[in-house]
Amino acid sequence: MKIQIGKKVRVARHILLPLMLGASLGATSVLASAQTTTPSNQGSMSSGAMKGNMPMDMRGSMMNMRKQMDAMKSSGDIDHDFAAMMRIHHQGAVDMAELELKKGKDPKMQQMAKDIIAAQNKEIAQFDQWLAQHKKQQK
C-alpha cells in the first residue's frame, strides 16, 4: 500500500527541512565558535568582557571570587569540592549584591540585591554546616 503525500506536505518538506537544517547548523557553529574562544577555566564571563563598562569595584569583586575559586585545589571528593566551590560563588554573589545596595539606584535592582543576599546567605550557612560535618577526604 502506497501512502499519498499531498502537495502541501511535499512543499513544506522541501522548504522547511532545509531551513530547519540550516538553522540547526548555524546554531551549532555559533556554539562551537563560542566554545573555542572561551577557555574552560574562564567561566562564562571572559576577563575582556569584565573590563568593559563594569564599575571597578564590581569587577574587583568578580576578580576576587575568581581568584579564590582558581586557588581552590580539588580534593577528588566531588561533594566536598562542590560545596566549597559553591560557597565561594555564593559569597561572590553576596558581595556584588552589597555593592548594588551601596551604589545602585534602581528600586527593582535594589530589591533583587536584598533577595539575593538573603537567599545566598541561607545557602552559605547550609554549605558551611555540611562542610563542617564532612571533612575533606583525599581520594
Image (spheres, rainbow, N blue to C red):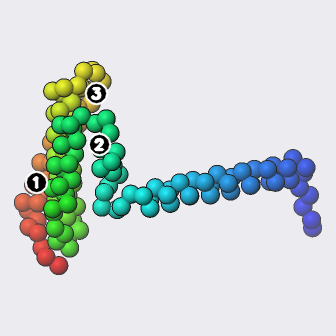
- Which labelled disc corresponds to residue 51? 2
Disc 1 marks a residue whose amino acid type is Asp
Q: Which residue is mark 3?
A: 109
Q: Which residue is mark 1?
A: 128
Kindly identify the residue that appears in the image at 16 percent across and 46 percent down: 91
How far across and how far down the image is residue 18, in percent? 74, 55
How crowded pointer 2 is (Cα within 10 Å; few <14, some 14-19, many 20+) is rated as few
Residue 130, above or below 100: below
How crowded pointer 1 is (Cα within 10 Å; few <14, some 14-19, many 20+) is rated as some
Circles 2 and 1, Cβ within 8 Å, touching? The answer is no
Of circles 2 and 3, the one toward us is 2
Residue 46, above or below 105: below
Disc 2 marks a residue whose amino acid type is Lys
The residue lying toward the viewer, choosing from 45 and 87, is 45
Residue 7, above or below 106: below
Disc 3 marks a residue whose amino acid type is Met
